[in-house]
Structure formats: C-alpha cells, structure tokens
Image (cartoon, helix red, strand yellow):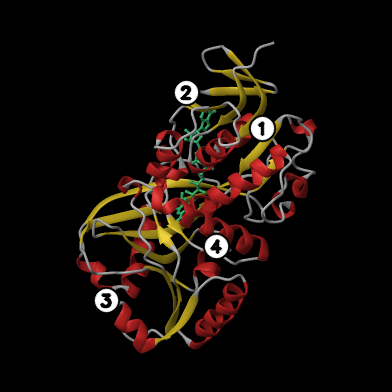
Amino acid sequence: MTLDADIIVVGGGIVGAACARALAATGQRVLVLDDRRGSATAAGMGHLVVMDDNPAELALSAYSLALWRQWMPQLDSTCAWHGCGTLWLASNEAEMQEAEKKQVRLHAAGVSCTLEGGAALAALEPSLRPGLFGALRVHQDAIVYAPNVARWLLEGPGTPATLQRRHASVVAIEEPHVRLADGTSLRARAVVLANGIHANTLCPGLPIRAKKGQLLITDRYPGTVHHQLVELGYVTSAHHATGPSVAFNVQPRPTGQLLIGSSREFDDTSVAMNFPLLEKMLRRAVAYLPALADCIATRCWTGVRAATPDSLPILGPHPSRPGLWLAVGHEGLGVTTGPASAQLLVAQMTGGPCPIDPTPYRAERFMTVCDHHDR
Ligand SMILES: Cc1cc2nc3c(=O)[nH]c(=O)nc-3n(C[C@H](O)[C@H](O)[C@H](O)COP(=O)(O)OP(=O)(O)OC[C@H]3O[C@@H](n4cnc5c(N)ncnc54)[C@H](O)[C@@H]3O)c2cc1C
C-alpha cells in the first residue's frame, strides 16, 4: 500500500516544527498536519532559558540552548532573536544563597553565569527598585518570537524538500493511519504526536494537565529594561505551586515593549482572562519595577501550558502503540527545549546515538497512566 508520507507529525507548534524539520533532514518524507486552532507557541513569552529544577531539566535545556545558538545565524529578522541574557533577582540574603547554589549547578553544566551584587545589579538595570540584594546573570539566555521560528522551521530557507505541511484537523490516530475531520485517512510508517495541550484527545491516558498563563504587553519604552528579569522566588512562587500563582517576569522586546508575566492556573483551558490574578501579577511586577506603573498596556492574553506530573516532556515511543511517537508535555519550557526534543526524538526513531540520556523523558515513567487500555 502506498504511503502519504514516511512520517506524519500532528501539530506545527515549535515542537512539531522542530521535530518535522529534523526528521526531514534525515531524508524521510514528512507531512505536518495543523488546523491552526491556537498554540502555546503563539501565546508564550519566547524566553530561551536554562532551567535547573532537576538534572534532567538542566541537561535538556542546556543542550537545547546550544542548538538554538547553532540556529541563530540562520534565523530571519522576524524570529526576533535577542541575546539579552537573564537576571535572576535576589531580593534578600536567602535568595542570594539560592543564586549561589544555582550558579554552582549551572557552571557544572557548562553554562556561563556570574553573581552580581546589589550595586552591580542597579547599574545593569537602573529601573529596578532600589535595595535588591543582587542577581545571578546567565549570559547566553535569549529571547525569540516563537511563532515565526516555527514558521521558519517549516518553510524558511533551507527547509528540506521532503518536508510538507497541510492545514488539516486530525480527529483520530489509528496507526499507521491518521483520520482527518473531512473523513479522509492518511497513511505513514510512523506518527509523531506533537499537538500540545490537545494530546489527550488523540491519545487518551497521557498524564497531561493544563497550566494556564496570562501575559500583558506594554507600549514602547525602549531602554527601560535590558535583560529578561525573573525573580529567584519564581521557582517556589510559581513553578512548584499547586494553586493559582504569580511571579515577577519581565522581558524587553526588541520593539521596546515590555512583556510582563507570569501566572499559573491549573486545569483551565479557556481563553478567558482572570483579571484578579492579572492584577496580582501586575502588582508584583510594579513592586520590582516601579516604572511599570506609568506604562500603557496595549494587550493581554492567555495561553495553556501542557504539564506532566514531573514537568519534563514526554519524548519517545508510546509504550504500547507501535508506530506512535510522543513529543508532548513541554509545559512552560517548550520553546527553549524544542530543538533538543527534536534531536532526542529523531535519534530514537532512527536508532542513532542520543545526544543526552533519553531515559528521564520517556513515556515509560508514566507506564500505569499511559496504559494501552486507556485508549
Ligand atoms: C503564558 C505562557 C508563557 C510561556 N513562556 C515560555 C517561555 O518564556 N519560554 C519557553 O521556553 N516556553 C514558554 N512557554 C511554553 C511554550 O510556549 C510551550 O511549551 C510550547 O510552545 C509548546 O509547543 P508545542 O509545539 O508542543 O505545542 P503548541 O505550540 O500548543 O502547538 C500545538 C499545535 O497543534 C495543533 N493541533 C492541536 N490539535 C490538533 C489536531 N487535532 N489536528 C491538527 N492540529 C492540531 C495546534 O493548532 C497547534 O499549532 C510558555 C507558555 C505559555 C502558555
């Protein structure tokens, strides 16, 4: 029977696009299906940041940042790469001690970073409130405009001719077939599921939970902020919280606008704003960056992160469905970890050497919830 493609990728967000391009680069015919229902890639902040909540997260994000730096010279201007670095802000002595520990972990992973005292921090970012204790400055973190990077991956210069994309809604995966909303079926040797928060509708039983976030962007105030600014309490106040939470996170867009985050709410996939939570988020932002109080906001929006119980993505074969591969569950770090996720998936699909240990990201760690009987 003839194949419509060697590999079908469901989802053309940053993860699906990175996987598709990397798979096509091996000479295989790859077809990306996306119905443009909306994506975390378009809703997110696009901060490329090394995160170190655990060794597996550090390994994946540090490796991915290295891959991003390889892409960087090829990206077009619409991708809006800016190597601004990150300042992890310490507001007291205890947070400064956290900064020191973080520096040790990042150095061990080969990530360039320096501790800055209060005076040095004030010189780097004069708009911050006076009296902050200091910061950890991570030099090679960066920002991008992620939806344009996804587009560049799928149709920019250098895209392999074997990579095709189609506007189509997938309603079922019956490997080796993919059934579309118009009733037609497509056949491939393998299917890659990379459809973010919607993964469970096509592959029930995946342990993926919604973590909604809200962002707000201001008018143009060039020079107000020079680095991505994140409070060190972010990991405790937002990342590991079990209820709604906010943390200070501000990004200087290349346009001069200030992109303000961040919030987390569980199990809500609606697009509706939560204005009381937005107010809390903005109050926290103004507490760090008083100048924000006089800035004009131009837009606010929501997006949904697809979170797994251990906050690591699921990358590799489905444990009980041969021919179905998973690249899902990237939570709040999928723009950063998209390139590394793609390389790990390709290595496993082609039997090549894995650049980092793939074990922590494999679906088998959730075997009981990924069971075939859940289909
Ligand atoms: C508020 C917020 C801030 C964030 N900030 C950052 C950040 O600063 N740095 C960072 O690294 N990450 C950040 N993230 C996380 C990051 O955006 C995501 O992890 C990443 O974009 C996930 O990409 P994806 O390709 O897996 O999924 P998505 O981008 O959601 O793409 C899934 C695609 O699948 C398509 N699709 C879904 N179902 C179907 C179907 N049945 N048929 C056809 N197509 C389908 C959709 O149209 C969509 O295009 C943030 C996320 C949010 C919400």
Identity of the amino acid at label 4?
Answer: His
Residue 264: image location, x then y, percent: 49, 56
Separation of disc 3 and disc 2 at Cα? 46 Å
Q: Nearer the viewer, mark 4 or mark 3?
A: 3
Residue 210 on image: x %, y %: 55, 46
Relative to 6, residue 89 above or below: below
Pointer 1: what residue?
203
Between the residue at mark 4 and the residue at mark 2, the CA separation in whole angstroms equals 35 Å
Residue on which disc 2 sits = 166
**Circle on res. 273:** none
Mark 2 falls on what kind of element? Answer: strand
Neighbourhood count class around disc 4 (C-alpha, 10 Å): few under 14, some 14–19, many 20 upward? some
Ligand 1 within 8 angstroms of badge 1 C-beta = no
- Give the residue drawn at x 61%, y 31%: 201
> What whole-number distance in Å separates the C-alpha atoms at marks 1 and 2?
21 Å
Q: Viewer-proximal residue, 274 or 71?
A: 71
Tell me the number on the disc at residue 239: 4
Amino acid type, mark 3: Ser
Mark toward the start of the polypeptide (1 vs 2): 2
